[in-house]
Structure formats: C-alpha cells, structure tokens
Amino acid sequence: MPSLHIAAQLIRRTMGSRRGLIMNVFIPAIFLAIISGLFSNLEGQKAVIVVQNADSGLMGGYLAAALEKEALYDIQLEVKLSEEELKNAVLDRKADAAVYIPEDYSQKLLQGITVEAGLYRMNEQLWSAALETSLAAEASKLAASASMVRATGGTADLTKLKELLDAQATPTIVAQNAGMKLGDVVSNPLMIGLILMFLMLLASQSIGFIMEDREKRTMARMFTAPLRAIDIAIGNFAGSMLVGTIQLLIVLSLTYFVFGYSPGISFGELLLVLEIFLLAAVGLASAVAGLVRNSTQLSQINNLVITPTSIISGCFFPISMLPDFMQKMANFTPQKWAIQAIDRLGGGGSLSDIGMQLSILFLFAAVMIAFGSAVLRPNQSSKS
C-alpha cells in the first residue's frame, strides 16, 4: 500500500539515523520518564503536620483526634513543644505545617467565645488550604455542639457534651459513592498531565516533518504522483502515530518498571487510553498545521494551543478550581476526557465504564484528522 511507504519514510526521517533515534526518540522519552519518576515520588509523600495540644480540656483532645483521622497528612502529635518551637519546626523544614491548640481552647468554647487553633505554614498550597478549611470546620462543629448543650441547661454539661461529640465522631450513616468509581487522578493530575502534554508536543513534532515537505514542495510532487489524497493523508498520520507509539512505550516502560509509578491501573489500560489520546493529538496538530504557512508559525501556534488547553483541561491542577465558564471550555479539549478516563479506571472502573470518554476522543480525532486532511495540502502558498 502507498500509505505504508509514506509512513515508513516519515519514520526513517524521524529515527532512521542514530542521531535522529537519540535526539527525536530516546532523549525526549527518557527525559519525561525521569521527570515522571521524580514527580511520582513527590506525589507519594504526605505533608508532615506537627500538632501541639496545650489544652487540657475536652475540646482540644477532640480537635487533635479529628486531625489524626485525616489520611491526607502525616500527623505527628507533640506534647513538649511550645508555640514558638512549632513555628521554628516549620521554618527549619522539619515539618510542612504546624497546628497549635491553645491552653484555654476548651474554656473559651464552653463560654461561647470564638477561638481558633493556630496554623503555621511556609506558603499557601492546595493541601494547606484544605487543612485550614478542615480546622475551621472542626472548630465550628465543636462550638455548635457546646452551644447546643449550653442552650438546653444554661451551662455546658460536660457529660452531655462528651456524649454528643462521641456520637458525631461515629456517625451511623455513611455516604458512599460506589457507583462513581472515582480515582485520585482528577484531584492530583500533574503526573498524567505531563504525559499528555508530552504526547501533544510529540504529535506536533511529527506534523512538523509534514510541514517541511509542504515548504520544500515535496508534498506537491507527491500529489502529482498516481496516489490518492487519502493515501497520502493516511500515510502521514500513520507515520506520526507509529513514532508517537514508540516514544510512548519507552516512557511508560521506564515509568512503570524502573520508577515504579502507576496511577492505579494496568500498563495495558493506560497504553490504550493514551494511544487514543495520541490519535486525537495528531488530529489537532494536523488541523493547526493546515492553518499556517510554515513550520515556524506551527511552533508558535502550538505554544498558543497546547499550553492553554492543558491548563484549562486539568493537566496541572484539579479542574474544579477553575471558574465555571473555563470548566465548560474544558469539554472541548481531549486532555480532559483522557484524564477522566484514566481516573475512572484508577477508581476501579472497567473499560465499559469509560466508553463515553473514549468515544469522545475518537470523535475528536476523526473531526480533526478530517479537517487536517482537507487543509494540509500543497495547493496553498508555503511562503511566509
């Protein structure tokens, strides 16, 4: 088939020489795998939170116990550190954050006085903001419980208060999202987001060779040969897919088997989703290439496409942090659907549970490839 010859020629140009194999395949793939390994190690580490409960009353103990139940953090209870020593522990990087429960914490809450536990951290991050929210929620719950008991008898009966707090600590009804099958990728997408962005850059690189053919009039000579336009398009896209697949296999192999990172799904399942995403990325790159005149413009346009779409699609931080209108815009990016598919697989779902996500990626790829095939032709001027 003519398409196979065109695809093979594109592969030879990309990795046919030793230099091309090293520069275009191995170095980018190994570089991403190393970054993936470093980020995967960081993701596995919990923030260390030092907690000092200076309160001898009932409320301080319940607040410290509530913090210990937070699975997101490594909670270390201290009994001898002062408030100043807690601050120094954070400044000296011995802890990521510190919580100080003051001596009169229970007394003030029982009297109806608003009081907060001190939270010390070096800078504002997503996990520290969540910790601050948890502290505020627990303090509000304790204050409401004390107020409720106080309203029934005029003073806060410690026995009744203890019974109420014990009942709150062990709820009889627990909500479960069993049908959602959600994983951890959506809430912590950076690792997968880097791989998706890398695949989009690879697709752009492969389409760059096609743009080079267009500039040098090689594509024009191909169209004068006894070849159908569909054969030329299929050959170019197949070559780009094969190059991307080889690089993807290198990245996933190093990431899984050398660095030991896994988003909670098997190697084959992740490869399947990323292969379909790669098809969509090739289609997007070809559609963009058809709208510009040379490879320099393609590189500039891609910088205006890949990075913004990666940001709004949730590749670097949870998409829920974005405004509503940007969350709606994310529905038109392939990255969002790939992340969602991987997240559902990581949450225990099967391939049948991500049928909608994969269908959207296929539809996106079909539309973009069809558009790219129509516009990426030699009948347009290649001069800038």
Image (spheres, grey):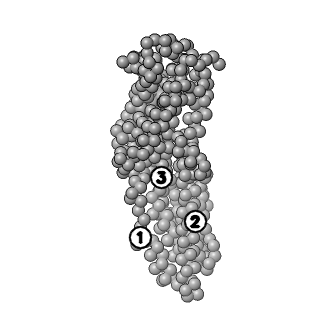
Query: Camera-side residue: 49 or 325?
Result: 325
In the rendering, at what x and y percent does residue 215 appear?
57, 16
The residue depicted at 41 percent of the width and 67 percent of the height is: 174
The residue depicted at 43 percent of the width and 71 percent of the height is: 171
The residue depicted at 59 percent of the width and 47 percent of the height is: 326
Label 2 close to label 3 by CB (< 8 Å) = no
In the rendering, at what x and y percent does residue 256 appear?
38, 38
Per the image, label 1 sits on a secondary structure element best described as loop
Q: Identify the image quadrant of the N terminus.
A: top left
The label nearer to you, 2 versus 1, is: 1
Per the image, label 2 sits on a secondary structure element best described as helix
Label 1 close to label 3 by CB (< 8 Å) = no
Query: Camera-side residue: 212 or 227?
Result: 227
Q: Amino acid at mark 1?
A: Ile
Which residue sits furthest right? Answer: 384
Q: Tell me, yes or no, if residue 252 can be seen here.
A: yes
Q: In the rendered structure, find residue 173 and report the number of the disc placed on it.
A: 1
Q: In the rendered structure, find residue 211 and report the number of the disc placed on it.
A: none
Instruction: Return the disc, 2 or 1, that comes first in the chain's sequence.
Output: 2
Q: Amino acid at mark 2?
A: Ala
Q: Tell me, yes or no, if residue 8 can be seen here.
A: no
Between the residue at mark 2 and the residue at mark 3, the CA separation in whole angstroms equals 21 Å
The label nearer to you, 2 versus 3, is: 2
Q: Amino acid at mark 3?
A: Lys
In the rendered image, which residue does mark 3 sit on?
A: 46
Q: In the rendered structure, find residue 136 and report the number of the disc placed on it.
A: 2
Label 3 crowd (10 A; few <14 / some 14-19 / many >=20)? some
Reply above or below: 276 against 5. below
